[in-house]
Amino acid sequence: IAEHQYERAKTIVLWDTKECKIPYGLDAGDVSKNIKTALEHTGYTGRVSIMATGDAKDDFCCHEISLNHFPAGERDARLKKVIADLMEDPAPWNLLLIVKDIPVDVGVAVDSENCNLLVATPEYPSGLLLCMASCSRLTLVGVKFSQLCAPFAAAKTDVFWDIDDCPIPDDLDPEMISQNIRSALKDKAYLGEVSISAYGDTNQIQGEFCSAGITPIHVPAGETSARVRIMVKLVGWALDNPGSNLMLIVQDISRNSAYMEALHFVRRRNCKLLIAQPQDASGHLLRMVSTEWRWSSLSYGGKPITQSERKSKVKDSVEY
């Protein structure tokens, strides 16, 4: 989240297009739009200017991206000069570096009290970039470039949580669950607004849900299950929220044909599906969701199931 003095300050983006190529299926305009939206949702609402380095591309200028061609062998020196020129501005400002790494002398050039450093790299930051975060007054935000410019990175995420299927662990409370879910989403670069709705027998701790920023939807015991209430809600939600992220926290729904049809409709509305369950997802559901958590991990803010695990499960389900 942006610090107060930098919230409305200008942000200069320096993007090395040779090291951080435009992801497949996107163009320069998509990347520009998604970077600006992600910055806004992270709290940086000031004017954004993008300067790209690399081979000339006609479509860059069409999307208000200034292109600088740095000859081979001159990249570091040119980058240092550009940063030094920018440092002459005494007002607070933000610098987003989209690079693989930066040499020491360039890092020294960035070290200024009025500059707030943000970084997106092809992989997670290491070396000098991490050192600068711990040893200087600069703020380092480590997000992979492919995640930052993904179409869904800045989109809203709505969380539908069945508290009967996935109850609150004994050592946690609604406030902690809310914080942990939001933290886990941010770690996967879902940077947009997060809304959480809890379905089930919420009467006992309704006040705790509300104070935690969670909307309680009371489903009395013995009536239609919370899971079914969520399924009914999905269709209307997808109609109203195309292009958003949907997280389901429910028991296994892979064998529920009505539920799967509802999720197919959600996907047809260009929505991205995330899921957390007490057990691993299975069957066709595996191929529908983009990110999968075990509830025992997500509830504590943990990491999702790895891509290698997911690929192995998909292969096993096909062979089965």
Image: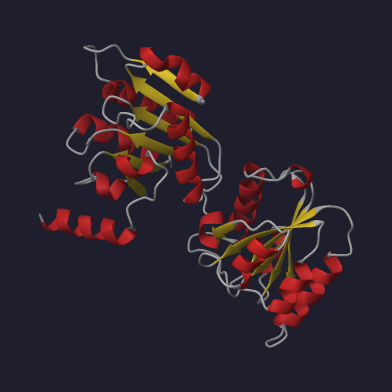
Relative horizontal placement of residue 269, taking residue 257 as reference (left or right): right
Relative horizontal placement of residue 185, taking residue 59 as reference (left or right): left
Q: Is residue 90 visible?
A: yes
Q: Work out which quarter of the rendered image holds the N terminus and state it.
A: top right
| Quarter occupied by residue 114 | bottom right
Task: Determine the residue positioned at 45% across, 33% down.
Answer: 176
The spot of residue 15 in percent (x, y) is 66, 66
Q: Is residue 70 visible?
A: no
Q: How many discs mark residues in the rendered view?
A: 0
Q: Work out which quarter of the rendered image holds the C terminus and state it.
A: bottom left
Between 259 and 13, the one nearer to me in the picture: 13
Please determine whether, in this image, residue 73 is positioned above or below residue 129: below
Between 293 and 273, the one nearer to me in the picture: 293
- Judged from this view, the residue extending furthest toward the left is 320
- The colour scheme used here is secondary structure
- Judged from this view, the residue extending furthest toward the front is 171
| Quarter occupied by residue 20 | bottom right
- Judged from this view, the residue extending furthest toward the bottom is 73
The spot of residue 88 in percent (x, y) is 89, 64
Task: Determine the residue positioned at 25% across, 44% down.
Answer: 285
Relative horizontal placement of residue 158, taking residue 56 as reference (left or right): left
Between 90 and 268, the one nearer to me in the picture: 90
Task: Determine the residue positioned at 32% across, 14% down.
Answer: 219
The spot of residue 43 in percent (x, y) is 67, 43
Task: Determine the residue positioned at 72% across, 72% down.
Answer: 107
